[in-house]
Image (tube, rainbow, N blue to C red):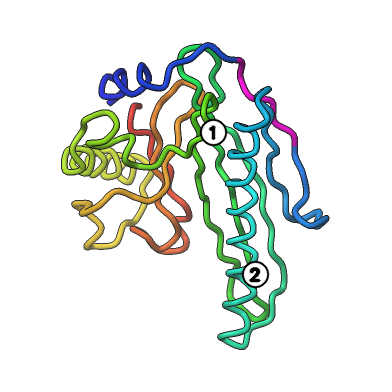
Amino acid sequence: MKKFFVALLMLISATCSAATIEPAHFNGNNDLIYPVVHVGDATVERKINTAIIAEVDRFVTGVYRNAQVNNLEVGGLYTSFDIGSNEAGNTVILSVIMTESVYYKMAAHPSTYRRTLNFNTSSGELMDVSYLTDVGAGVPVSELCAGLTQKLKAKAERENLFLFDDALPLKELPNDFYWDENLHVHFIFQQYEVAPYAVGIIDVDFDA
Protein backbone atom coordinates (compact mmCIF):
# COMPACT_ATOMS: atom_id res chain seq x y z
CA MET A 1 0.00 0.00 0.00
CA LYS A 2 2.74 2.44 0.94
CA LYS A 3 4.09 2.53 -2.61
CA PHE A 4 0.75 4.00 -3.71
CA PHE A 5 1.39 7.09 -1.64
CA VAL A 6 4.85 8.07 -2.91
CA ALA A 7 3.28 10.50 -5.39
CA LEU A 8 1.07 11.94 -2.68
CA LEU A 9 3.97 12.57 -0.33
CA MET A 10 5.90 14.27 -3.11
CA LEU A 11 2.92 16.52 -3.80
CA ILE A 12 2.75 17.77 -0.23
CA SER A 13 6.47 17.82 0.50
CA ALA A 14 8.01 20.88 2.14
CA THR A 15 10.79 21.73 4.52
CA CYS A 16 9.23 22.39 7.90
CA SER A 17 9.39 21.31 11.50
CA ALA A 18 7.07 18.86 13.17
CA ALA A 19 4.07 20.45 14.81
CA THR A 20 4.09 21.17 18.53
CA ILE A 21 1.00 19.90 20.33
CA GLU A 22 -0.48 21.01 23.65
CA PRO A 23 -3.75 19.91 25.29
CA ALA A 24 -6.61 22.30 25.98
CA HIS A 25 -10.10 22.02 27.47
CA PHE A 26 -13.18 22.82 25.43
CA ASN A 27 -15.15 25.65 27.09
CA GLY A 28 -13.23 25.00 30.30
CA ASN A 29 -14.59 21.45 30.65
CA ASN A 30 -11.85 19.15 31.98
CA ASP A 31 -13.52 16.12 30.39
CA LEU A 32 -13.33 17.59 26.88
CA ILE A 33 -9.69 17.57 25.86
CA TYR A 34 -8.44 18.52 22.42
CA PRO A 35 -5.05 19.40 20.88
CA VAL A 36 -3.83 22.90 20.09
CA VAL A 37 -1.35 22.78 17.21
CA HIS A 38 1.61 25.10 16.68
CA VAL A 39 3.59 25.09 13.42
CA GLY A 40 5.16 28.55 13.42
CA ASP A 41 2.74 30.04 10.88
CA ALA A 42 -0.27 31.87 12.30
CA THR A 43 -2.43 31.40 9.20
CA VAL A 44 -1.79 27.65 9.05
CA GLU A 45 -2.31 27.29 12.80
CA ARG A 46 -5.64 29.07 12.55
CA LYS A 47 -6.86 26.68 9.84
CA ILE A 48 -5.81 23.58 11.75
CA ASN A 49 -7.04 24.64 15.17
CA THR A 50 -10.33 25.96 13.82
CA ALA A 51 -11.01 22.56 12.23
CA ILE A 52 -10.17 20.73 15.46
CA ILE A 53 -12.40 22.96 17.60
CA ALA A 54 -15.19 22.60 15.04
CA GLU A 55 -15.01 18.81 15.40
CA VAL A 56 -15.29 18.97 19.21
CA ASP A 57 -18.16 21.45 18.92
CA ARG A 58 -19.91 19.19 16.40
CA PHE A 59 -19.68 16.29 18.84
CA VAL A 60 -20.91 18.24 21.88
CA THR A 61 -23.73 19.96 19.99
CA GLY A 62 -24.82 16.66 18.47
CA VAL A 63 -24.96 14.96 21.88
CA TYR A 64 -27.27 17.56 23.40
CA ARG A 65 -29.41 17.81 20.27
CA ASN A 66 -29.90 14.03 20.32
CA ALA A 67 -30.72 14.16 24.03
CA GLN A 68 -33.36 16.82 23.46
CA VAL A 69 -34.96 15.09 20.48
CA ASN A 70 -35.08 11.67 22.18
CA ASN A 71 -35.82 12.85 25.71
CA LEU A 72 -32.51 11.57 27.08
CA GLU A 73 -30.34 12.81 29.93
CA VAL A 74 -26.61 13.16 29.35
CA GLY A 75 -24.67 11.35 32.05
CA GLY A 76 -21.26 12.32 30.74
CA LEU A 77 -19.33 13.19 27.62
CA TYR A 78 -15.63 12.99 27.09
CA THR A 79 -13.00 13.62 24.47
CA SER A 80 -9.31 12.80 24.30
CA PHE A 81 -6.79 12.68 21.49
CA ASP A 82 -3.81 10.80 20.09
CA ILE A 83 -1.35 11.87 17.43
CA GLY A 84 -0.51 9.54 14.57
CA SER A 85 1.94 11.02 12.11
CA ASN A 86 3.66 14.27 13.03
CA GLU A 87 6.41 14.17 10.47
CA ALA A 88 8.98 16.84 9.74
CA GLY A 89 10.77 17.36 6.44
CA ASN A 90 9.32 15.83 3.32
CA THR A 91 5.96 14.56 4.56
CA VAL A 92 4.36 17.38 6.63
CA ILE A 93 1.42 15.17 7.59
CA LEU A 94 -0.23 15.64 10.97
CA SER A 95 -2.85 13.04 11.90
CA VAL A 96 -5.07 13.76 14.90
CA ILE A 97 -7.21 10.94 16.28
CA MET A 98 -10.07 12.23 18.46
CA THR A 99 -11.82 9.79 20.79
CA GLU A 100 -15.36 10.98 21.58
CA SER A 101 -17.55 9.22 24.12
CA VAL A 102 -21.03 9.91 25.48
CA TYR A 103 -23.08 8.17 28.15
CA TYR A 104 -26.82 8.75 28.37
CA LYS A 105 -28.32 7.93 31.76
CA MET A 106 -30.09 4.56 31.89
CA ALA A 107 -28.28 3.41 28.73
CA ALA A 108 -26.68 -0.04 28.76
CA HIS A 109 -23.28 1.36 27.87
CA PRO A 110 -21.55 4.49 26.56
CA SER A 111 -21.14 5.16 22.84
CA THR A 112 -17.61 5.87 21.69
CA TYR A 113 -16.29 7.01 18.32
CA ARG A 114 -12.83 7.65 16.96
CA ARG A 115 -12.72 10.55 14.51
CA THR A 116 -9.68 11.53 12.49
CA LEU A 117 -8.39 14.80 11.13
CA ASN A 118 -5.42 14.76 8.76
CA PHE A 119 -3.63 18.00 7.95
CA ASN A 120 -0.98 19.20 5.56
CA THR A 121 0.99 21.31 8.03
CA SER A 122 2.56 23.43 5.31
CA SER A 123 -0.87 24.72 4.21
CA GLY A 124 -3.27 23.82 7.03
CA GLU A 125 -5.55 22.01 4.58
CA LEU A 126 -7.55 18.99 5.69
CA MET A 127 -6.63 15.81 3.82
CA ASP A 128 -9.75 13.74 3.23
CA VAL A 129 -10.12 10.31 1.69
CA SER A 130 -9.68 11.76 -1.81
CA TYR A 131 -5.95 11.88 -1.04
CA LEU A 132 -5.99 8.10 -0.99
CA THR A 133 -7.99 7.66 -4.17
CA ASP A 134 -8.14 9.15 -7.63
CA VAL A 135 -7.53 12.78 -6.67
CA GLY A 136 -4.51 12.03 -4.52
CA ALA A 137 -2.45 8.92 -5.02
CA GLY A 138 -4.30 7.66 -8.08
CA VAL A 139 -5.62 4.50 -6.42
CA PRO A 140 -9.22 3.58 -7.36
CA VAL A 141 -11.70 3.18 -4.52
CA SER A 142 -12.46 -0.35 -5.72
CA GLU A 143 -8.81 -1.33 -5.35
CA LEU A 144 -8.60 0.13 -1.86
CA CYS A 145 -11.85 -1.60 -0.83
CA ALA A 146 -10.59 -4.93 -2.12
CA GLY A 147 -7.31 -4.58 -0.26
CA LEU A 148 -9.00 -3.40 2.93
CA THR A 149 -11.46 -6.29 2.76
CA GLN A 150 -8.55 -8.71 2.87
CA LYS A 151 -6.82 -6.83 5.68
CA LEU A 152 -9.99 -6.70 7.79
CA LYS A 153 -10.72 -10.38 7.17
CA ALA A 154 -7.18 -11.34 8.19
CA LYS A 155 -7.36 -9.21 11.34
CA ALA A 156 -10.70 -10.73 12.32
CA GLU A 157 -9.34 -14.26 11.88
CA ARG A 158 -6.10 -13.46 13.70
CA GLU A 159 -7.79 -11.77 16.67
CA ASN A 160 -10.96 -13.89 16.66
CA LEU A 161 -13.23 -10.91 15.98
CA PHE A 162 -16.84 -11.61 15.05
CA LEU A 163 -17.96 -9.60 12.00
CA PHE A 164 -21.50 -9.16 10.74
CA ASP A 165 -22.42 -11.64 8.00
CA ASP A 166 -22.81 -8.88 5.42
CA ALA A 167 -19.69 -6.91 6.47
CA LEU A 168 -17.48 -8.34 3.72
CA PRO A 169 -16.68 -7.60 1.02
CA LEU A 170 -16.53 -3.88 1.79
CA LYS A 171 -18.58 -1.75 -0.55
CA GLU A 172 -17.09 1.57 0.51
CA LEU A 173 -14.20 2.92 2.54
CA PRO A 174 -14.67 3.98 6.15
CA ASN A 175 -14.93 7.73 6.67
CA ASP A 176 -12.06 7.82 9.15
CA PHE A 177 -8.41 7.08 8.40
CA TYR A 178 -5.03 8.33 9.54
CA TRP A 179 -1.30 7.98 9.04
CA ASP A 180 0.78 6.61 11.91
CA GLU A 181 4.36 7.53 12.85
CA ASN A 182 5.67 5.11 10.22
CA LEU A 183 3.38 6.61 7.57
CA HIS A 184 1.25 3.48 7.50
CA VAL A 185 -2.36 4.19 6.57
CA HIS A 186 -4.92 3.03 9.14
CA PHE A 187 -8.67 2.74 8.53
CA ILE A 188 -11.08 2.93 11.47
CA PHE A 189 -14.36 1.03 11.70
CA GLN A 190 -16.67 2.48 14.33
CA GLN A 191 -18.77 0.48 16.77
CA TYR A 192 -21.56 -1.40 14.93
CA GLU A 193 -20.10 -0.49 11.53
CA VAL A 194 -18.95 -4.02 10.68
CA ALA A 195 -19.20 -5.82 14.03
CA PRO A 196 -21.22 -5.93 17.26
CA TYR A 197 -20.65 -3.44 20.07
CA ALA A 198 -18.60 -5.94 22.09
CA VAL A 199 -15.92 -6.02 19.37
CA GLY A 200 -15.33 -2.32 19.84
CA ILE A 201 -13.68 0.07 17.40
CA ILE A 202 -11.54 -1.73 14.84
CA ASP A 203 -8.29 -0.15 13.64
CA VAL A 204 -6.83 -1.77 10.51
CA ASP A 205 -3.24 -1.01 9.50
CA PHE A 206 -3.39 -1.22 5.71
CA ASP A 207 0.39 -1.26 5.35
CA ALA A 208 1.16 -3.91 7.98
Q: Which residues lie in the magenta part?
A: 17-22
Q: Which residue is mark 2?
A: 103
Q: Residue at left 56%, top 65%?
A: 111
Q: Secondary structure at mark 2?
A: strand
In the current view of this chain or complex, which residue is farthest to the front? 43
Q: Residue at left 26%, top 44%?
A: 153
Query: Residue 66 falls in which quadrant of the image?
Result: bottom right
Badge 1 or badge 2: first in the primary sequence:
2
Task: Assess disc 1: are there few (<14), some (14-19) or many (≥20) residues with their C-alpha within 10 Å of its C-alpha.
Answer: many
67 falls in the magenta region: no
Residue 192 in the image: state x and y as whole percent: 40, 63
Which numbered dot is residue 124? Answer: 1
Q: Residue at left 26%, top 40%?
A: 148
**Alpha carbon separation for disc pair 1 and 2:** 33 Å
Residue 125 in the image: state x and y as whole percent: 49, 36
Q: Residue at left 21%, top 33%?
A: 139
Q: Nearer the viewer, residue 156 or 188?
A: 188
Q: Is residue 15 above or below residue 133?
A: above
Q: Amino acid at mark 2?
A: Tyr
In the current view of this chain or complex, which residue is farthest to the bottom? 71
Lateral position of residue 196 relative to residue 98, left or right: left
Q: Amino acid at mark 1?
A: Gly
